[in-house]
Image: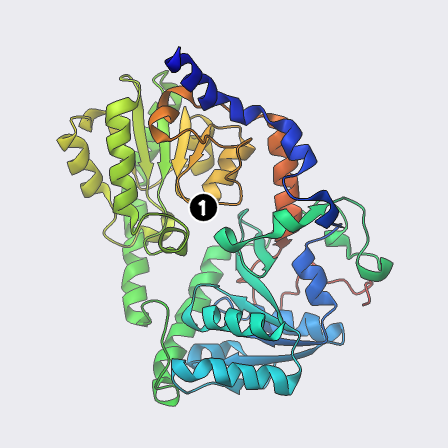
Amino acid sequence: MIESQTEAAAVMHIHDLTALKAGSSDVASTQFVGVNPAWLSLSTARSVLLLQGPLGPFFDRLSVWLHSLGIDVNRIVFQGGDELDCQALSPIRFTDKLTQWPLFLRQTLQSLRVDHIVLFGQSRAYHALAREVASQLGVTVVVLEEGYFRPGFATMELGGVNGYSTTLDRYKWVAGLSGADSTPLPPALAADIQPDATPYHFQKMAWHASQHYLALRQARLRYPHYVHHKNDNPYWYAHYWIRSWAKKLWFRRSDRMAQSQLLSNSRPYYFVPLQHDGDAQITHHSCFNQNTDFIIQVLRSFCAHAPTDSLLVFRQHPYSRGGPGHAQFIGSLAQELRVGSRVLHLVEGDTPLLAQHSAGVVLINSTVGLQALERGAPLIVLGDALYKQRHLCFWAGLDLFWHHCQRPDPEATRLFLGQMKNLTQLPVSLYADRSEPLVWSSASWDK
């Protein structure tokens, strides 16, 4: 009797479509909008301060758009790479120690009468402190990140993204609503948004990154106290990406063959996409300190509880390909647990396709989770994610997931993804060239 009750509890949560339609937050406090609320707030700002942005000219493109709306725009730069990227404005330079940053920012916000701060990378030391100062002064913070949906989107939210996001609790998207003061929306945002189609995304990102880090290194004497959030040696990055592309070419054929066998074989497999090493989704938005902690938990649970005829397939994060990876660690632990013949590690592979055909997807917090939901794959999330909802994901624990996972309700998934995409995303390539206008700009749209 107890076993049957446990099984029922393990599967009943994915059918709660009524809860999704009603919404989990207080209806009276919900704001109904027809466009991303962060974009809407930013478009009505008076004075905007930009901090660090994506590598390359995106913040210059954003500055041009803000200026076209009659908004005053300023930018603080912290190092030589920021200076190189900032060509549309005369920058404000911060060259002091990190301990002096909150006071410097407070004085700047007050002197410029700033009402909106825009930043990319909420967990960087300068940005974490900036969010605190802004909160104290009542300044709105607009946070940008790589898109939850990729490619062709950027994430833009008020206050925070990922585990710090409150957008879906505060807003509901309704197609057809106009902008502020009944102003028509730009064509690209007037309906269910579609991704930007700018080509050569990765190549442009790599070019901007190489230029940014060279400038950072060359200007070290002008910014002696700057603290970077990751390795800032351009030669290290050159070696890393050369190694990454070499591994991609080396494993492409064998991993494609392994993928074909997985998709053509009737033997069930569970799919585990790994996070990028050092990603904030691990360090700030999960109970794991690093990827290996996650791998250990998944492998041990799989060994003890998964169906004996099933396989476990790990997929290395593409941005981690230039590093040592986890193939050896996974293989050694799998052998130790006596499931070596049932565990695979892929460097290459079609991630959405692997998720779609799997018996279930296990992850920390990744865009792969959204791809899995879009394709109706069973999903369990072990970190914090906006899509970690009881009507979408498995909540009864990893040990039960292997036998009791079910596919999410299609209608619940469709409604949720529509809300998430239109409330948190903007169609744009963050690494497009300086001459490429923002796709949500419109000459026919006036503030």
* Residue 143 higher or lower than 215, as above or below: above
How was the colour assigned to the protein in this rendering?
rainbow
Judging depth in this view, the residue of 370 and 96 nearest the camera is 96
Percent coordinates x, y for residue 23 in the rendering: 66, 38
Q: Residue furthest right?
A: 182
Task: Name the residue beneath numbered marker 1.
Answer: 384
Quarter in which the N terminus is drawn: top left
Q: Estimate the x, y position of residue 217 in percent, counting from the top left.
A: 34, 79
Q: Residue furthest left?
A: 336
Whether residue 200 is visible, yes or no, is no
Q: Is residue 431 left or right of residue 307?
A: right
- The kind of residue on which mark 1 rests is Asp
Identify the residue at horizontal 65%, vertical 40% (top origin).
Answer: 418
The one nearer the camera, 299 or 223, is 299
In the image as oriented, which residue stretches furthest toward the top? 1
Image-based side of 265 in relation to 375, left or right: left
Residue 10 shown left or right of residue 193 in the figure: left
Q: Quadrant of residue 383?
A: top left
- Count the labels in the image: 1
The x and y percentages for residue 248 are 32, 47
In the image, residue 414 sits, relative to residue 324, either above or below, namely: above
Quadrant in the picture for the C terminus: bottom right
Q: Residue at x 33, y 56 (%)?
A: 278
Question: Where's residue 55, x and y in %?
Answer: 47, 68
Q: Secondary structure at mark 1?
A: loop
167 shown above or below 296: below
Q: Residues within 10 Å of mark 1 (few under 14, many from 20)?
A: some
Compare residues 225 and 203 and report the one nearer the observer. Answer: 225
Quarter-wise, where is residue 98 in the image? Answer: bottom left
